[in-house]
Image (spheres, helix red, strand yellow):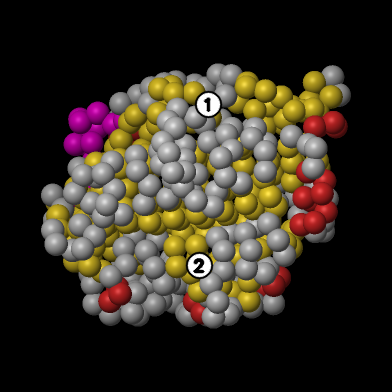
Amino acid sequence: EVWGKMYCPSGWNYVFVGGGGRGLSPPAQQACSGGTPGKVVAAPLGWGAEKPFLVVEEGVWSIHVPKFVSSVVGASSSVIGWKLDLESEVFVTRPGMTDSEINDGMKGKKGLLVTPGIYLLKAPIEVKDSRFVVLGIGWPTLVATEGRPAIQVADDLVQVRVAGLLLEASTPMRSAPVEPVVLWGTKPKEYVLPGKAGGLISDIFVRVGSFKYRKCQVVRADTMMEINSDDVVMDHTWLWHADHDDCGTDLTHTGPSDQCHSVHGLVVNGRRVTSYGLAAEHTVSGSMSVWNGEEGDVYFYQSEVPYHQADWAEKGFAGYVVGRNVEKHRARGVGVYIISSKLKGKIRSAFLLPPYAEVYNLFNVTIGALDQFGSLACTENGGQCVLPQKCTPMRCFLS
């Protein structure tokens, strides 16, 4: 009964992964009065690992790196795969260090601990070795200032960890494209080698916008995060083009962040990439997320599309796109929404999907306005569209 009351607000997905429960029972859902009851997805943890963490034992500091596990239900035991001695195996940054100083410090080490601060980077922090660990504490900010990634992971690595970072696109606006803010691998493998743990991305946020500490400059970011390697797991990722800032942009007023350029929040080209808790928002010149790799697996997706850009809907973009040639893709608990906007016309579809995608519990929501979605889901070429099972005035869902 208590859970039913907590999750009664209509129009949202509630996704429980690895909790051991079944989500809300049918009676609990029926007890929700009015509107569309929240759709609930419950599933075991398919494949993943817990975030690395700092430990001090008798005055000795280390980083513990949990193992990859599969089909987990219940509390995680965080079985440790290996430990890194902080003094001998880990390079510790200091605020104000340059990319050259950080990359030089990483040589011969097995890990990087990024301490709180703002780091202005002309070139990426480069991960070149398997089993390397990058761990941020206190939300350090890595700022890409010259069109290069803030962090780049080399091809064909396994068991890499990157966690606890805020990454910011801060390349001044220009006509030439810029590289992704986070770049994991440069190209998909030409051969299939399943069963390897490529790496883990935990608690990573990427943002694009104008901010006062950077003098409200207008910036460019084509893609916030691009995953080209196979068997990478993302756990809690937010990719955000600012719809409000401290330079005058907010819900009802356009500002410098609206003039910044972005195309995609996420592009996935690697195989068997898994995501838990993914959000991508407000990219102004393309679809929020584009999944081209086979066997993608997504648990919860949230996307708010831009609402200050009048022509965004007319260009045929969507909140979530799976490539038309993809044969295997699965997603659960996915939602796309928009706030009362200045868009011309309707968004053709919240989701663009190939015929063989398995997608469960889809939502689209329009907040504070009439419905602005033509369809809930369509094939990428628009040849076939799916209407929702049920709509309230502003919310539609399909189980």
Tell me which amino acid carries mark 2.
Asp
Q: Is residue 256 visible?
A: no
Residue 302, placed above or below residue 308? above
Measuring 75% from the left and 28% from the top, which residue is drawn there?
A: 84
Residue 164, horizontal then vertical, whole percent: 63, 44
Residue 5: image location, x then y, percent: 32, 38
Task: Please tell me which residue is depicted at 26% across the width and 55% down the height of the picture.
Answer: 324
Q: How many residues crowd mark 1 within 10 Å: few (<14), some (14–19), many (20+)?
A: some
**Which amino acid type corresponds to the residue marked 1 in the rendered image?**
Phe
Question: Which mark is on residue 222?
Answer: 2
In magenta stretch: residue 28 = yes
Residue 267 on image: x %, y % = 44, 55
Residue 26 appears in the picture as rendered: yes
Span shown in magenta: 23-36
Q: Which residue is mark 1?
A: 68
Q: Nearer the viewer, residue 251 or 117?
A: 117
Check the image and report above or below for 298 versus 221. above
93 horizontally vs 217: left or right: right
